[in-house]
Image (cartoon, rainbow, N blue to C red):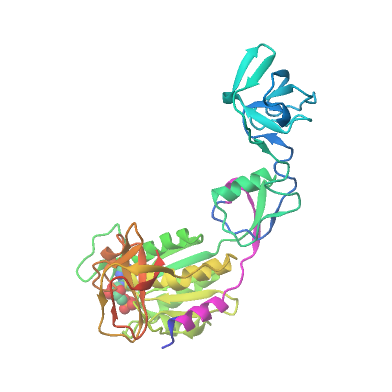
Amino acid sequence: MISFEKAQSIVQSSCNLMDTEEVELHQLLGRVLAQEVVSDMNMPPFDKSAVDGYACRRSDIADLLEVVEVVAAGQVPRHEVGEHQCTKIMTGAMMPKGADCVLMVEDTAQVDCLHIRYKKETVKNNICILGEDMKAEQVAITAGVAIQPQHIAVLAALGYTKALVYRKPKVAILSTGDELVEPSEKPQQGQIRNSNGHQLVAQVLRAGGIPFYMGIVEDTERATYTAIRKAIDESDILLLTGGVSMGDYDFVPSVLIRCGVDLLFDSVAVQPGKPTTFGKTDGGKLVFGLPGNPVSSFTQFELLVRPAMDAMMGEKPKEMFKKMRLGADYRRKNTERLAFVPVIISSDGEASPTEYHGSAHIFSLPSAQGLLAVPLGVAELKKGDEVDVRPI
Ligand code: AMP
Ligand code: MG
């Protein structure tokens, strides 16, 4: 059995970067940039008015001002503003030469059809200066950033109609177990519905991958072998659930070896998820044998698979845990493994364990927003303690 940290580092060092592809602006949300985004221009590209008002000389604001021109956004001013003159200007319009401030229209009074007067004594510049937000040739977004709508605005402003991103990994999902039936079926005696496979589809989607759902595999060596071969051929990552424990029908690790997978670990000091198995093919494909119990499968996906997918998609490493305060005392007997416990996170950031009966208890997870890490050797945590929580 290896430590969780060791398992994490083995998985991380087994990850290869995906190839890149060019993707259209509207399809870029959530994708990880494989290039720098460089500004092709100064932003703003000209001195522009920040308000609707009158552009004039600061030294003239106490005087009657003659309006020499009206400039709308998108127009180029034709007149220079001279002494005791002003240009009526709209927000975003180009500043006329000669003016060094803009009087807000609300703070002015129309004297006659050609003249205005400022009603206040001081004025801010109210000008957005050429290049103050971004300079030409400057890097606006670095590679490794997962694109959010805010990044799309920057890309659009800088003239990018597409960008180079890492390909999404295709993730095959196989659920092993003779007891399993699909959600559309009513389980007969001894059967349960396959929840892992569908949970994993959603987890893969949330992590930015392409799920390839391959259904249920019966607990025979032959069926397991055939399914694993096909899954490895057709995906970048294979996720299996079940069949990795010590039961008579747990064939996954031995079949993986027969399929040429180099098994790098098959037992991790973590709870839930001890029998988590991991290996790599010659071709660099990753294979995770996740435990059958759905909370274990969920947890190990979040802790091991998701960071691996992030690394393959070139995303900059993120903090694994957030520091939080524990909202209630926590106690456990067995301290041999690093435990992960579903927690509810309150609006003031306190994490409190949910009702949790163990790794089959899927009903504990929907109300949880995090997994509390209880370190190896620790039997007790007190309300108010600073703890590590993995948001889910
Ligand atoms: P196993 O790791 O195959 O021994 O399975 C451990 C436990 O998880 C057993 O109680 C299984 O019935 C259950 N289990 C396995 N696969 C699934 C699945 N896909 N969905 C829900 N429960 C499962
Ligand atoms: Mg099984």
Quarter occupied by residue 337: bottom left
Residue 277 at x, y percent in the picture: 43, 80
Residue 334, quarter of picture: bottom left
**Nearest the eye: 291 or 127:** 127
Q: Quadrant of the C terminus?
A: bottom left
Q: Is residue 56 left or right of residue 382?
A: right
Does the magenta segment cover residue 342? no
Q: Which residues are magenta?
A: 5-28
Quadrant assignment for the N terminus: bottom left
Q: Can you see residue 294?
A: no
Residue depicted at x 57% and y 64%: 315
Q: Is residue 259 left or right of residue 175?
A: right
Q: Furthest-bottom residue in view?
A: 1
Residue 25 lies in the magenta stretch: yes
- Place residue 126 in its image quadrant: top right
- Is 367 in front, or is 258? 367
Residue 324 is at least partly visible in this image: yes
Where is residue 390 shown, x and y percent of the image? 41, 68
Which residue does the image show at 28% across and 75% down from the upper left?
382
Point out the residue furthest to the top here: 112
**Is 333 above or below relative to 24?**
below
**Number of marks in the rendered image:** 0
Q: Quadrant of ligand 1?
A: bottom left
Instruction: Tell me: 164 left or right of 357.
Output: right
The answer to whether 161 is drawn above or below residue 237 in the figure is: above
State the residue at coordinates (44%, 70%).
321
On the image, the x and y values in percent for residue 266 come to: 43, 84
